[in-house]
Image (cartoon, grey):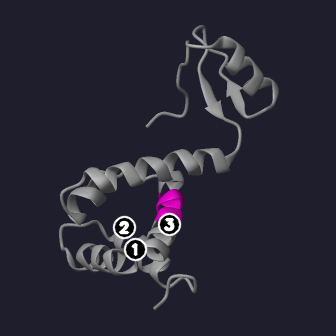
C-alpha cells in the first residue's frame, strides 16, 4: 500500500475533490493524491481487507496477506466488528482459526482478541 496514488482520467473531478479538501495533492513533479481524512482511509482499507477475505482460501492466508501498520490495524478492527455483526458464526470460526494457529504473528492474535472483547461483538 502507498500513501499517495496517481489519477489522470478526470482532472476536473480531482480538482473539485482537492478544492473541497477531500483529497490532498503531493508536491511532487508528478501530481499524486491522498485522502484528507482518516475516515476515507478507513473506508478504503476496510474495502481492501474485505476483498482479501473474499479471495483468501483460508484464515491463515487471509491474515498473512495483510500488512502490519497502525492504519491497517485500525481498519482491520473496524472490518472485524462489521464481520461479527453480519456473519457471527463465520467470524467466530475465522477468529478461532487465527488465534490457535501457531504460525500467525501474536500481534494479529491480539488485534482479533481485542475486537472480540469489544462489547458490540462479545457473545
Residue 87, percent across and down?
40, 74
**How far separated are the C-alphas under marks 3 and 2?**
10 Å
Q: Which residue is mark 3?
A: 77
Q: Which residue is mark 1?
A: 87
Please determine whether, in this image, residue 112 is positioned above or below residue 76. Answer: below
Q: Quadrant of the N terminus?
A: top left
Residues in magenta, as a range: 73-79
Q: Residue furthest bottom?
A: 123
Element assignment for label 1? loop
**How far separated are the C-alphas under marks 3 and 1?**
15 Å
**Which mark's residue is nearer the viewer, 1 or 2?**
1
Other residues around mark 3 within 10 Å, as few (<14) / some (14–19) / many (≥20): some
Of residues 100 and 53, the one nearer the viewer is 53
Mark closer to the chain start, 3 or 2: 3
Of residues 94 and 66, the one nearer the viewer is 94
Residue 60, percent across and down?
21, 63
Mark closer to the chain start, 3 or 1: 3
- The question of residue 76 being in magenta is answered with yes
For image coordinates 28% across by 80% down, the residue present is 96
Q: Which residue is mark 2?
A: 108
The reply to whether dot 3 and dot 1 touch (C-beta < 8 Å) is no
Amino acid at each position: 500500500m502507498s500513501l499517495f496514488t496517481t489519477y489522470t482520467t478526470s482532472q476536473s473531478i480531482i480538482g473539485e475533490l482537492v478544492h473541497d479538501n477531500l483529497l490532498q495533492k503531493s508536491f511532487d513533479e508528478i501530481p499524486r493524491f491522498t485522502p484528507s481524512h482518516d475516515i476515507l482511509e478507513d473506508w478504503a482499507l476496510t474495502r481492501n481487507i474485505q476483498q482479501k477475505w473474499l479471495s483468501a482460501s483460508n484464515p491463515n492466508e487471509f491474515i498473512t496477506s495483510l500488512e502490519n501498520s497502525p492504519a491497517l490495524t485500525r481498519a482491520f478492527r473496524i472490518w472485524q466488528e462489521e464481520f461479527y455483526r453480519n456473519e457471527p458464526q463465520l467470524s467466530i470460526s475465522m477468529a478461532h482459526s487465527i488465534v490457535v494457529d501457531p504460525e500467525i504473528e501474536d500481534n494479529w492474535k491480539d488485534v482479533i482478541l481485542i475486537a472480540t472483547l469489544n462489547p458490540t461483538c462479545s457473545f
